[in-house]
Image: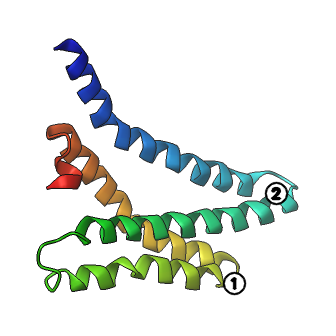
Amino acid sequence: MVEDEDAEQIASRAPFMLALLGFVPFAVLTGAQFVPGATLAQTLGLTALNVYAAIILSFLGGIRWGMVVNAPDQQAVIPVFLLSVVPSLWAWAAFFAPGPWASSCMRSALRPWAGGIVRWSRAAKRRPGSACCG
């Protein structure tokens, strides 16, 4: 049916589109750093950027946790559980780092996830539902 194919096509594009929307605050808040003579905008923008990055890192760790929480062999996924809390802890520690160090720490933690999002969206396009469900 045509309607089913349209719904499938929209569903396969949704994760990628949402990831792009999630990038908008990064772009806007980074752009605030380049507003000439606006030190308040720069200071608030950098703080907001670091807070948003910390939230996203926590979210990404939670996704990894959620993907294995119902695994049949819980002993086998203990390393995944342990690794899934690292982004949140890293973000928390980085948030308290002085000035540019916080942003550098957040970027270094987010960079590996960016490639994962691209691979995940490609897998979803090939086989809708496969990227998150097996």
Instruction: Please tell me which residue is depicted at 83% across the width and 52% down the height of the picture.
Output: 36
Disc 1 and disc 2 in contact, CB within 8 angstroms: no
Coloring scheme used: rainbow
Indicate which disc, 1 or 2, sits on the residue closer to the N terminus. 2
In percent of width and height, residue 74 lies at 17, 81
> Residues under labels 1 and 2: Cα distance?
18 Å
> Tag 1's secondary structure?
loop
Q: Is residue 95 above or below residue 4?
A: below
Nearest to the observer: residue 50 or residue 35: 50
**Residue type indicated by callout 1:** Pro
Instruction: Please tell me which residue is depicted at 71% across the width and 68% down the height of the picture.
Output: 47
Q: Find residue 98 and name its label.
A: 1
In percent of width and height, residue 95 lies at 62, 79
State which quarter of the image contains the N terminus: top left
The residue where tag 2 is placed is: 41
> Residue 82 lies in what quarter of the image?
bottom left
Instruction: Please tell me which residue is depicted at 65% across the width and 48% down the height of the picture.
Output: 28
Q: Residue furthest top?
A: 2
Q: Is residue 24 left or right of residue 28?
A: left
Q: Is residue 48 left or right of residue 9?
A: right
Q: Is residue 76 left or right of residue 4?
A: left
State which quarter of the image contains the C terminus: bottom left
In percent of width and height, residue 100 lies at 65, 76
In percent of width and height, residue 13 lies at 32, 35
Q: Is residue 53 above or below residue 24?
A: below
> Residue 116 lies in what quarter of the image?
bottom left
**Residue type indicated by callout 2:** Ala
Number of marks drawn: 2
